[in-house]
Structure formats: structure tokens, C-alpha cells
Amino acid sequence: MEIWIVEKGEKRGPFEAYEVRGRIEEARLTGDELAWHKDQEGWVALREMDIFRSAFEESREVPDSPPPVPPGPPFPYRRFFARWFDIYLYLLLLCSVVRFSGYDLLDAMMSSWAMFSLLPFVLLEAIVLHLTKTTPGKFLLGLRVVGPEEEALSLRAALVRSLRVYILGLGLMPCFGVLTGICHVYCIWYLMRRNEAPWDAASQNRVRAARLLPFRIVVFGMLFTGILLLFSAVLGPASVEFWEQVRESAERAD
């Protein structure tokens, strides 16, 4: 079928139907142009031609703005290692401050406040997420946390998220060691099944991941190893004495 179209006062053509449909899909034709083909009595608006009516209806259904970005893949192992990188980095800094401030590290580890030693971490993580959309561990592994519109989390939203992670993901660590393990297993299962973590499901936050290059993995591994070694060095004898006291307490309880 050969079709003639009047554009800007000039008769143009002939066009094949597929050519006209392609120009409609590219928004190069508005539908108000006059059109004619040999089986038609006179000129009519292009959108009134039966062959193109559905094409214009489809074009009207296209939204003005793109739909929300769907949740990305869960990347459970990246998120797991990024989380523990951040925790050990925080604990390294905390223990260093305690030790080099002149306080006895063993006494600090045995004190009641040690049970809530990760609460400042919750606040610090929320602030960093609010300002940068990521954390040191997430940055190294190409992860960032954003809101439903890809925006940075507000400080309140970031704090709520970090508290949920502390409760649901870490099981109030270090208060209940067994609970922490149970929460880890549950959250990985939930993440793999639902494609999002429990703490992001209600808020519609999203974790986005960049392509993970081998170089990033090497750098992350070296830095994480360094943090663990420094952490062990800072703890030193205090760690051995701590576990000795824990063992003796368990034996006395028996």
C-alpha cells in the first residue's frame, strides 16, 4: 500500500505502511497530517486511518517519565563482605582509641557497655550513607544505597535502615552471638528469595551494584586482610585474656 502524506503544506510520498509506522513510533508524525492512499475516497487525518489508529493509541500510552527502576540483583556475598569490612574497620578504630587513650582494653571488653559497642557504628553508618550513598566496604565492592528515585537517603531514612540492619541482620551484635548467626542465615535466605533485604523491603530503598573488576577484588582483599591483622595486633594479649576468662566462667558455671 502506497501512502501519501501532506507535511508542512507539501505532498510527500509515496511511503510504504511500515515506513509510516516507523515514523509514528519515532514521534516524527503527530497524526494531524493529511494522508491518502488509492483505496480511500479523500484526504483524512493520518490518525484516522484504520491501519495507523492502533499505532497512535500505543504512542499515547507511553509515560512522560520512565517507570521506577526495578530492584537490582541481590549480590548477597558482596553485601556480606562489605558489611563485615565496615564492622571490623569500626572495631579497629574503636579499640585503637580505647587502648591508646590509656584505658585497659581487657576491662573495656569485659564491661557492660561493650554489649552496646556497635550502637555508635549505627549512627556513623547512617551519616556516611546519607552523605555519600555508600560506606567504605560498599565503595570498594561497587555498591551504593539509594532511595526509590535513586536519590541519597535522608539522614532519618539512613538511620532507620542502619537500626534495622543492627536488629534484623546482626541480631543486636554482640549481645547474642547465636542470634547473630541465625539472623545472618535468615537474611541471606530472604535476600536470595525476594531480591532485596528485609530492611529495604518496607522502605523501597535499593542497593545498586557496579561491575566488579578483578582489581577491586584484589584491593578489597588486601585492605580487609590488613584491617584484620591490625585488629589482632591492637587486641594483643587482651584478646587471649578475655577468652581465658570466658572459659573459666563457663567452667565455674558447670
Image (spheres, rainbow, N blue to C red):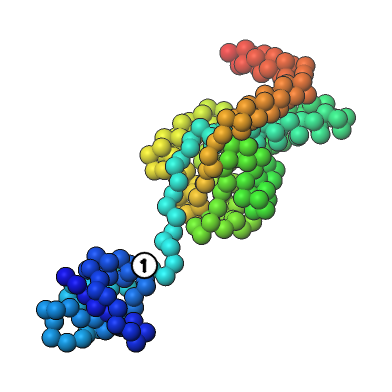
Image quarter of residue 104: top right
Asked which secondary structure carries label 1, the reply is loop
Measured along the vertical axis of the image, is residue 58 above or below residue 7?
A: above
Measured along the vertical axis of the image, is residue 18 above or below residue 134?
A: below
Q: Which residue is mark 1?
A: 26
Residue 199: give x, y in percent of width and height: 50, 47
Residue 233: give x, y in percent of width and height: 77, 20
How many residues crowd around disc 1 within 10 Å: few (fewer than 14), some, or many (20 or more)?
A: few
Give the amino acid at mark 1.
Glu
Indicate the quadrant containing the C terminus: top left, top right, bottom left or bottom right. top right
Closer to the camera in the image, 105 or 92: 92
Closer to the camera in the image, 202 or 32: 32
Closer to the camera in the image, 178 or 19: 19
Is residue 92 in view? yes
Classify residue 41 as left or right of residue 175: left
Residue 91: give x, y in percent of width and height: 71, 32
